[in-house]
Amino acid sequence: MTARLRSHEAFARAQRLIPGGVNSPARAFGAVGGEPIFFQSGLGQHLTDVDGHRYLDYIGSWGPMILGHRHPRVVAAIDEALSRGTSYGAPTEAESGLAEQIIEAVPSIEKVRMVSSGTEAAMSGVRLARGATGRELIIKFAGNYHGHADSLLVAAGSSAATLGVPNSPGVTAGTAKDTLVLEYNDPAGLEEAFKSHGDAIAAVLMEPVVGNMGLVVPTPEFLKAARSLTEKHGSVLLFDEVMTGFRLAYGGAQELHGVTPDLTTLGKIVGGGLPLGAYGGRADLMDQVLPAGKVFQAGTLSGNPLAVAAGSATLAELKEHSPYADLDRRGRRLEEGLRSAAEAADLPVWVARVGSMLTIFFQPGWLADGASPQPVTGWKTASLSDTDRYARFFWGLIDHGIYFPCSQFEALFFSTRHTDADIEQTIAAAAEVLHTLRPA
Ligand SMILES: *Cc1c(COP(=O)(O)O)cnc(C)c1O
């Protein structure tokens, strides 16, 4: 592909003005090397960069754009809301409309509060769980991301039930010590933690299908343990469905798994590409949020009219024209195509997928004769991935005009606008690139 001169200049300018040149670190291409691409527009399944190159987009703004860019129904809804005003700091009828859609869609949600980001939703959900239980400890799982609230920016160096250590300067040890980090898909570890700390655990917080260490699927045993242990010990089970909500099924991963959490956080798709998040769940819990109850949470732009309009239109479209069977069929084809292309190149990969989310994990070493790829079940196995090979794969696809996640540890997303031909084109391009990654 030709040079991205204007992206290069835009990045140089941005770096003088904005830390690292980006407003969110995942955009900086740190994990694949090189410079980020600057974009000027998107339409349907495509993005156009500032140098005029077009890419098939497998990021979808990291999840929100399930209907593709500039979906006519979403654009019309934003236009209509815009013609009346952009923010009132006062309630609107449209907020109840979106609340009705969310409550109808998501099995666990009886009442819902709107905020402006997934971070805010997770932070508020955790505060509510602590406020409602009068307990301080929360359990999270290594490799799960819940936004950047202090108490959630904690990771463990091992899968052992260690008290959390902060993984960002500025997060105090005092905050981190209230977060227990466990290995995902380890029901025994969870049971152990409840045995030692059961009556102090306010909440178990988890991505019910993980997208933030690459795609990792929970086992039924793990989900069952999370549900029954929290129930038994009076802790809150909080599903972070910021990524999976309205993505894997209209009712999110909880609909898919048939497991009902006490609280759920939403973001990304629920705002239709505008800044909106939400948390909701059992009415008796949600009624403890101010002003119905005493747990404080507020926001100047919460339930913003433009974001509510975009979210509401997106959900209406997903409900009226359910895309999930088609997304799953295309996802299966992409999964199989990538797997066979890797096999043909003798490259050991683990391809994980649910619906329209997928990760190709490059495994360390070469595939020994007859050996099968090792399942990626949590951070312990995900972190073994060959990130250098992933980086070469990423840049190879960029040269084919295909925009995959700029990190081994991020899932890809595709939209309802991606066609069968797009999927075939992606598989063919991936096969070519994978071939160049074979051993010398
Ligand atoms: C993206 C994400 C968040 C954070 O949402 P923001 O809107 O970026 O603050 C939280 N949890 C999960 C599972 C996410 O994928």
Image: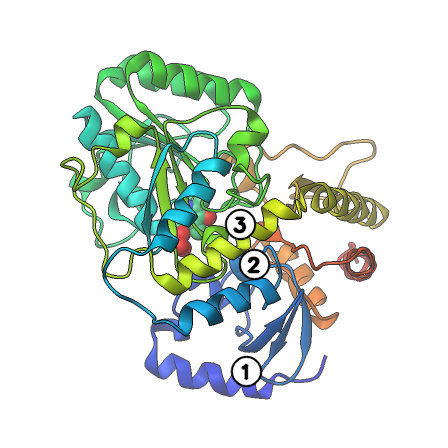
The residue carrying pointer 2 sits among few (fewer than 14), some (14 to 19) or many (20 or more) residues within 10 Å by Cα, namely: many
Q: CA distance from mark 3 to mark 1?
A: 34 Å
Relative side of 350 to 267, left or right: right
Q: Which mark is residue 7?
A: 1
Q: Could you tell me if the residues under marks 1 and 2 are in contact, i.e. CB atoms within 8 Å?
A: no
Q: Amino acid at mark 1?
A: Ser
- Mark 2 — residue? 65
Of badges 1 and 2, the one in the foreground is 2
Q: Eyeballing the image, is 151 above or below 70?
A: above
The residue carrying pointer 3 sits among few (fewer than 14), some (14 to 19) or many (20 or more) residues within 10 Å by Cα, namely: many
Q: CA distance from mark 3 to mark 2?
A: 12 Å
Q: Amino acid at mark 3?
A: Leu
Is residue 71 visible in this depiction of the protein? Answer: no
Q: Which mark is residue 315?
A: 3
First-in-chain label (3 vs 1): 1
Where disc 3 sits, the SS reads helix
Where disc 2 sits, the SS reads loop
Q: Eyeballing the image, is 70 above or below 347?
A: below
Q: Amino acid at mark 2?
A: Met
Spot occupied by residue 216 in the image (x, y as percentages of width and height) = 57, 37
Q: CA distance from mark 1 to mark 2?
A: 23 Å
